[in-house]
Amino acid sequence: WEAMAPLLLIWILVPSVAGMWKSSNHQSINEAYTNLLEAEIGNGFWSGNLQGSEYFGLSLDSEDPNDYTLRGLSEKFNVSLNYAQGASQCTNNKGKKCVALVMLAGLLQEDITKRVGTACPEIQGDDVRGCAFICGLMSNLMWHAEVLAKEMKEDYVLDVIVMHDETLNKQILNLIHRLGARTLKLDPSVKRMACHGYLNVSPSRIIENRLNHEVCEHAPFDGKHFNRFHRMMLVESLKLGAASLTEYDVIIHNDVDIFIESTSDLEEEIDYFVKNPKIMMMARIGAASPLNAGHWLMRPSMKAVGLWLEDMQGGFTTKDGWGKAGQVVPQISEIYGDHSPKLHPGNWDFTGSQLDQGLLFHVFAVKLHGYYATGGKAMKIVLEKLDYKGDPINFVDPKFGDHGPGIRHYCGHGKPWDENACSNKLVTCDRKVLLARLMNRLYPIVEKHPLSKKSDFMKKFCVSRLKTGYTSCAPFENNRRSDNC
C-alpha cells in the first residue's frame, strides 16, 4: 500500500489520468499521455484513440478541460448525458479504424395513462405503428449485422449503436442487446431543456399549442400533453447526441428506414472521409434544405455536443435560426433543372430547419465550418460554378462527387415493415420495385435469424408482418424501375 500511495494520490488529484486509465485499450498512463499529445487535432478539438475515456473531444487549449466532458456539459446545462452501453467490437482491434453505425429510435406515444399494451403485448406496445417501427428497427439491425459484418473490409471495425429516449422500454432494449448492438440513452432532461428553449423565443406558442413551462418540465412526452409535431421535433433534435461517441473515429448516422445495400458504396464514403481530416460532417444536400439529415458521416466531438446543447437551450426562430445566427442559409431550394440563381443567404425556413437539419447545419456548417456537401445538387453548384460566396458550406471533390445509390432511404410511403407494403396505392411503381428487391433478401434474413425463433414479438408480430410485404412486393421484383405498374 505504501508503494501504491503516490499513484493513488495522482489518481485522485488528476482526473484526466483517471480518465485515461479507463481506456478500453488498457494503455499505460505514459502511453495514453503520449497518444493524447500526438493525436491529430481538428479545429482545436481532439477525437483520438483512448477508447472509453470521458475526456474524448477536450480542447487541448481549453483553460478548463472539464468543460468538454460529459460531466462538465451535464453540469453546465443541467441535463444528464450518458455513456453507450454494451460491449464494443473495437476493444480488441487496436490499430484499426473504429466506426459506429448509429440510429435514433423513439416512439411518438399517445396518452400513456390509457396504456393497455395490446397491439404487441410481448413488448408492451399499444400502437400498431409503434410496434411496426420496432419491427423495422430489429429488421434493420439484423440486416446490417448480416451484410456489413460479412462484407466490410478489414481496415474498419464496426459497432452498431441505437440511440434512444425514454420511450424504449426494457423489453425492447433487451432485444437490441441480444442482437449485439450497443445503446445510448438520451435522457428526458435534454428534451425538457429543448422544450423550454422552444417556448422562450416565441411566447405566443404557449397559447397556440397549450404548452407552458410546467408541461415542459414535468409532463410525459405523450399525445395528451404534446401534439405530434412537438413530439417529433423533440425526438429528432436528439440526433446530435451521436457527437458524444468520441471513442469512435467515424460516426455514420442512418435513419431506421435506410438500408445499406452496397457495402462498397459505404466504404468509399468512409475512405474519403477518413483521408480528409478537415471534414467534420459529410452529407448530401437535401431537396429543400442545405443538408439531408437521414444519412451522414461525422467526426465526434464534445465541442459539437456543447454547441448542440447551447442551441437547444437558446431556441429557434425562422428569422434568426439557431443561436441567433441570422441570415446565413443559402437558398438551396431555388436550384431546379437548368435554373441557376445566385445562392444568396436567407432565412431559416428550409425543410427541417427547426429540427435535426437545422441543428446539424448550424453546429457543423456555421459554427465549426466543417460541413462538406456531396450529392447531385452539391456537384451542380461546383461544376456549374454557381454564384456561391460567403455561405458556410464546403464541397467534396467532384471526383468523389455524386455517389452512393447502394445506400437506400425508404422515406415516405412504402416502408419495408409496412403491412402489405406494395398493395398501398400511395406507393410508387419505382418504390415497389426497390422494395421487392430488398425484401427478397431482408425477409429471409429476419425469418431465419435465431432471435426470431426465440422472441415472441419477432415470431408473432414482426416476421408475419414482414411476410405480407415480401408477398405483396414479389410480383414487382423483375420489373424495371421505369415500368408502369
Image: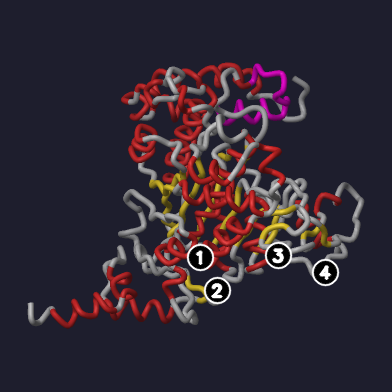
**Amino acid at the residue labelled 2:** Gly
* Magenta stretch holds residue 429: yes
Say what secondary structure mark 2 lies in.
strand
Can you say whether 266 is above or below 11 in the image? above
For marks 4 and 3, the one nearer the N-term is 4
Which residue has dot 2 on it?
Answer: 42
Q: Quadrant of residue 280?
A: bottom right
Are dots 1 and 2 in contact, CB under 8 Å?
A: yes
Marked residue nearer the N-terminal end (1 or 4): 1
The span from disc 1 to disc 4 (Cα, nearest Å) is: 28 Å
SS majority, magenta: helix
Question: Which residue is the site of mark 1?
Answer: 301
Magenta range is 422-440
* Residue 389 - label: 4
* Residue toward you, 192 or 27: 192
- Helix, strand or loop status at disc 1: loop
The answer to whether residue 307 is left or right of residue 47 is right
Q: Secondary structure at mark 4?
A: loop
Indicate the amino acid at tag 3: Asp
Sooner in the amino-acid sequence: mark 4 or mark 2: 2
Q: State the image coordinates of residue 199 (x, y, percent, origin top left).
A: 64, 49
Mark 3 lies on a secondary structure that is loop
Q: Nearer the viewer, mark 1 or mark 2?
A: 1
Q: Taking the image as drawn, is residue 377 in sight? A: yes
What amino acid type is highlighted by mark number 1?
Answer: Ser
Q: Position of residue 430 (x, y in %)?
A: 72, 29
